[in-house]
Image: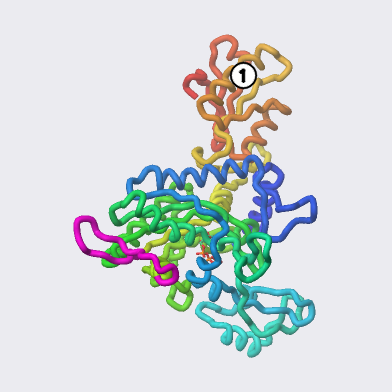
Amino acid sequence: MNDQQKMENIVSLAKRRGFIYPGSDVYGGLSGTWDFGPLGVTLKRNIMQLWWKMFVSDRDDMYGVDAAILMNQKVWQASGHVATFTDPLVEDEVTHLRYRADHLLKDAGYPVDGLNLADMTKLIRDNNVKSPAGNELSDVRTFNMMFKTTVGPVDDESSVSYLRPETAQGIFTNYKNVLDSFYPDLPFGLAQQGKAFRNEISPRDFIFRSREFEQMEIEYFVDPAKWEEAFEHWRQQVWQWTEALGLPTENVHELEVPESDRAHYSKRTIDFEFDFPIGREELLGLAYRTDFDLGNIQRESGKNMEYTVKGTNNKFVPHVIEPSFGVERALMAVLSSAYTEDEVNGEKRIFLKLPEHLAPVKFAVSPLLKNKPELVARAKEIYTSLKQKYGAVMWDDNGNIGKRYRRQDEIGTPNCVVVDFTTLEDGSVTVRDRDTTEQKRVQPGEL
Ligand code: ATP
């Protein structure tokens, strides 16, 4: 199975088994949007809850917020997004289809790191690079990726707003509120999870590049003199996160982003890349945003964003370390690490080797035969007690046992419990391990 086949198999399994469907599928879809089905939403929430536990609930220096998606347009002017949140766009002169210039050039084998618009246009002209349809290309120009909308019944410039392209600004605008409510010691952080929207020129690669996706972001406020220490702390935390997701360490890579490729607000960025089946691509980012955002807010709003160190007159606008995580990319990394094919009794088997704490279903419970009321009754009892304890338990009595195992393997259920005739004699059930396919007999209390 090569990488492309693997990706196709994952997309197909995700749809077939109720993890992820193309958005608006019955109407022919809407490019760059995806809907999560019953298992997908559970897997996604398990990832998000793990993150919240690790980075908010388990720590003493973190505060959660949940800001509105629609924000005053001044937020996006001050943050620089109206002016500079753009991607390089190039147009096919005949079909008028638009492409991301850097992706087009990269796919054609040209290095694009650090190139500006004029450089890319020159590269296209010098090498006579054509569109995928073989036509001439326009000059490269910028395209703002924010979705614009209007708020309220009057459609004029003052009512313009944007669907947020990052959750970060909803954190910065609440920094002062949290400071006034809690007066935390520095360093402290604010965390938020939620939707972000980017009008990507060419969404692609399954959920990797979508137009609507979910982010989990932390803005960690520090004394400017101590930013390096905090950056290192979060670098280590990111590694712990990838470990908690069960991603193989050898598939995660740090990329120190050169200045020419950094976002407008960043003085240092490390992209954490992952070996996806689509290639080595960004999983998440870690950036030193300095006092760029709080400084802008202070200037544009006229409100003081300084922090006063307790018991002193020492005041400054804190600097910020920002680890920024994409939920869909985490999910895609988890799925691609988990997707496994092997052979059992001479037959091909597909299974998701999901870490148990992320698996959407922890136990499947079956009676060996569904037409034996005494087996069904006993299995129901065990199912109910496991469900009370773990929640994520599935009742499965469709088809023969072999088929049930295959179905549970495909959705990554780590344990399949079967009630058979021996259960009626000594109470024990069989439990089958997803990865080894080994079965053992245990008492239900040991599950
Ligand atoms: P890329 O270079 O791949 O477009 P980016 O550098 O623009 O990503 P950031 O602005 O750093 O991304 O966003 C932080 C995180 O949000 C990314 O690391 C990624 O996990 C996620 N993310 C960004 N854009 C998308 C998207 N279009 N679809 C899914 N996730 C995304």
Can you tell which quarter of the image residue 431 is in? top right
Residue at disc 1, secondary structure:
helix
Q: Residue at x 60, y 61 (%)?
A: 163
| Direction left: furthest residue | 312
The question of residue 312 being in magenta is answered with: yes
Q: Position of residue 165 (x, y in %)?
A: 56, 63
Residue type, numbered disc 1 = Ala
Q: Is 13 left or right of 239, judged from the image as shown?
A: right
Q: Residue at x 54, y 52 (%)?
A: 194
> Which stretch appears magenta?
299-319
For residue 359, say whether it is visible: yes
Q: Position of residue 406 (x, y in %)?
A: 66, 36
Color style of the picture: rainbow
Q: Residue at x 66, y 43 (%)?
A: 37
Can you tell which quarter of the image residue 131 is in? bottom right
Q: Which residue is mark 1?
A: 379
Q: Position of residue 142 (x, y in %)?
A: 61, 78
